[in-house]
Amino acid sequence: MARDGYFFAVLGRVHPRFHTTSVALLLQAMLSIALLLSGGSFRQFFSLAIFSEWLFYMLTASTVFVFRRREPDAPRPYRVWGYPVVPVLFVLASAALLYYTFTDNLRNSALGCLVILAGIPVFYAFARQRSV
Protein backbone atom coordinates (compact mmCIF):
# COMPACT_ATOMS: atom_id res chain seq x y z
CA MET A 1 0.00 0.00 0.00
CA ALA A 2 2.84 2.37 0.79
CA ARG A 3 4.46 1.82 -2.59
CA ASP A 4 1.09 2.50 -4.26
CA GLY A 5 0.77 5.81 -2.41
CA TYR A 6 -1.90 4.73 0.08
CA PHE A 7 0.34 5.00 3.14
CA PHE A 8 3.60 6.64 4.21
CA ALA A 9 6.15 6.11 1.44
CA VAL A 10 8.96 5.28 3.89
CA LEU A 11 7.10 2.10 4.90
CA GLY A 12 7.28 0.86 1.32
CA ARG A 13 11.07 0.98 1.11
CA VAL A 14 12.55 -2.37 0.15
CA HIS A 15 15.86 -3.47 1.68
CA PRO A 16 18.44 -3.81 -1.13
CA ARG A 17 19.94 -7.04 0.17
CA PHE A 18 17.01 -8.90 1.74
CA HIS A 19 14.24 -7.58 -0.53
CA THR A 20 11.90 -7.01 2.41
CA THR A 21 10.08 -3.91 3.57
CA SER A 22 12.47 -3.53 6.48
CA VAL A 23 11.10 -0.21 7.79
CA ALA A 24 7.55 -1.60 7.88
CA LEU A 25 8.76 -4.77 9.60
CA LEU A 26 10.64 -2.73 12.19
CA LEU A 27 7.58 -0.57 12.86
CA GLN A 28 5.38 -3.66 13.22
CA ALA A 29 7.86 -5.19 15.67
CA MET A 30 7.96 -1.99 17.73
CA LEU A 31 4.15 -1.77 17.83
CA SER A 32 3.91 -5.42 18.88
CA ILE A 33 6.45 -4.95 21.66
CA ALA A 34 4.67 -1.80 22.84
CA LEU A 35 1.37 -3.69 22.93
CA LEU A 36 2.92 -6.50 24.95
CA LEU A 37 4.62 -4.10 27.36
CA SER A 38 1.40 -2.13 27.87
CA GLY A 39 0.19 -4.77 30.28
CA GLY A 40 -1.53 -7.11 27.88
CA SER A 41 -0.79 -10.80 28.04
CA PHE A 42 0.63 -12.81 25.19
CA ARG A 43 -2.66 -14.72 25.03
CA GLN A 44 -4.57 -11.45 24.61
CA PHE A 45 -2.17 -10.28 21.90
CA PHE A 46 -2.37 -13.65 20.16
CA SER A 47 -6.18 -13.80 20.16
CA LEU A 48 -6.37 -10.24 18.82
CA ALA A 49 -4.05 -11.13 15.95
CA ILE A 50 -5.76 -14.46 15.23
CA PHE A 51 -9.19 -12.87 14.89
CA SER A 52 -7.92 -10.23 12.46
CA GLU A 53 -5.91 -12.73 10.43
CA TRP A 54 -8.77 -15.19 10.02
CA LEU A 55 -11.13 -12.41 9.02
CA PHE A 56 -8.79 -11.49 6.17
CA TYR A 57 -8.21 -15.16 5.23
CA MET A 58 -11.97 -15.57 4.88
CA LEU A 59 -12.34 -12.37 2.84
CA THR A 60 -9.42 -13.33 0.59
CA ALA A 61 -10.86 -16.78 -0.11
CA SER A 62 -14.24 -15.19 -0.85
CA THR A 63 -12.72 -13.10 -3.62
CA VAL A 64 -12.20 -16.26 -5.68
CA PHE A 65 -15.95 -16.31 -6.30
CA VAL A 66 -16.15 -12.57 -6.95
CA PHE A 67 -13.39 -12.58 -9.56
CA ARG A 68 -14.60 -15.77 -11.24
CA ARG A 69 -18.01 -14.16 -11.71
CA ARG A 70 -16.80 -10.65 -12.55
CA GLU A 71 -14.05 -11.75 -14.96
CA PRO A 72 -14.94 -15.22 -16.26
CA ASP A 73 -12.53 -15.08 -19.22
CA ALA A 74 -9.51 -13.69 -17.38
CA PRO A 75 -6.35 -15.81 -17.48
CA ARG A 76 -5.90 -17.81 -14.28
CA PRO A 77 -2.29 -17.98 -13.01
CA TYR A 78 -3.29 -20.82 -10.67
CA ARG A 79 -6.15 -23.26 -10.40
CA VAL A 80 -8.13 -23.68 -7.20
CA TRP A 81 -8.24 -27.36 -6.31
CA GLY A 82 -11.77 -28.64 -5.75
CA TYR A 83 -13.46 -25.42 -6.90
CA PRO A 84 -16.12 -24.45 -5.76
CA VAL A 85 -16.44 -26.96 -2.89
CA VAL A 86 -13.06 -26.42 -1.21
CA PRO A 87 -13.23 -22.60 -1.17
CA VAL A 88 -16.82 -22.73 0.15
CA LEU A 89 -15.77 -25.11 2.93
CA PHE A 90 -12.84 -22.86 3.80
CA VAL A 91 -15.02 -19.74 3.95
CA LEU A 92 -17.61 -21.55 6.11
CA ALA A 93 -14.94 -22.93 8.45
CA SER A 94 -13.37 -19.48 8.73
CA ALA A 95 -16.75 -17.92 9.50
CA ALA A 96 -17.37 -20.54 12.20
CA LEU A 97 -13.93 -19.91 13.70
CA LEU A 98 -14.57 -16.16 13.72
CA TYR A 99 -17.98 -16.65 15.32
CA TYR A 100 -16.61 -18.85 18.11
CA THR A 101 -13.63 -16.56 18.66
CA PHE A 102 -15.95 -13.57 18.84
CA THR A 103 -18.31 -15.23 21.32
CA ASP A 104 -15.45 -16.65 23.41
CA ASN A 105 -13.44 -13.44 23.64
CA LEU A 106 -15.74 -10.53 22.87
CA ARG A 107 -13.38 -7.81 24.10
CA ASN A 108 -10.38 -8.76 21.96
CA SER A 109 -12.53 -9.57 18.94
CA ALA A 110 -14.28 -6.21 19.16
CA LEU A 111 -10.90 -4.51 19.55
CA GLY A 112 -9.65 -6.32 16.44
CA CYS A 113 -12.71 -5.13 14.51
CA LEU A 114 -12.18 -1.57 15.71
CA VAL A 115 -8.54 -1.59 14.62
CA ILE A 116 -9.55 -2.83 11.17
CA LEU A 117 -12.41 -0.32 10.89
CA ALA A 118 -10.07 2.48 12.00
CA GLY A 119 -8.01 1.76 8.91
CA ILE A 120 -10.87 2.69 6.56
CA PRO A 121 -10.76 6.47 7.14
CA VAL A 122 -6.96 6.36 7.05
CA PHE A 123 -7.11 4.62 3.67
CA TYR A 124 -9.53 7.21 2.27
CA ALA A 125 -7.43 10.08 3.64
CA PHE A 126 -4.38 8.77 1.78
CA ALA A 127 -6.47 8.03 -1.33
CA ARG A 128 -7.79 11.61 -1.35
CA GLN A 129 -4.27 12.98 -0.89
CA ARG A 130 -3.03 10.74 -3.69
CA SER A 131 -5.67 11.98 -6.15
CA VAL A 132 -4.94 15.67 -5.47
Image: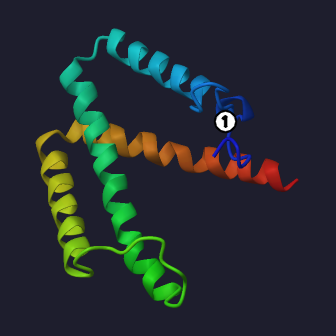
**Residue sitting at 37 percent across and 62 percent down?**
59
Indicate whether 45 appears above or below 107. Answer: above
Question: 127 or 80: which is nearer to us?
Answer: 80
In the rendered structure, which amino acid carries the disc numbered 1? Gly
In terms of image quadrants, where is residue 2? top right
Say left or right for 55 vs 21.
left
**Residue sitting at 22 percent across and 17 percent down?**
41
**Residue sitting at 54 percent across and 44 percent down?**
119
Q: Which residue is disc 1 drawn over? A: 12
Question: 71 or 53: which is nearer to us?
Answer: 71
Q: Position of residue 72 (x, y in %)?
A: 49, 90
Indicate whether 7 appears above or below 86. Answer: above
Q: How many labels does the image show?
A: 1
Q: Where is residue 43 in the image (x, y as percent from the top left)?
A: 18, 24
Indicate whether 26 appears above or below 100. Answer: above
Q: Residue furthest front?
A: 17
Q: Position of residue 89 (x, y in %)?
A: 17, 71
Q: Which residue lies furthest to the right in this view?
A: 132
In terms of image quadrants, where is residue 34? top left
Say left or right for 100 vs 16.
left
Q: Residues within 10 Å of mark 1 (few under 14, many from 20)?
A: some
Q: Position of residue 60 (x, y in %)?
A: 39, 62
Say left or right for 99 vs 119.
left
**Residue sitting at 35 percent across and 70 percent down?**
62
Say left or right for 96 vs 54.
left
Q: What is the secondary structure assignment of the residue under circle 1? A: helix
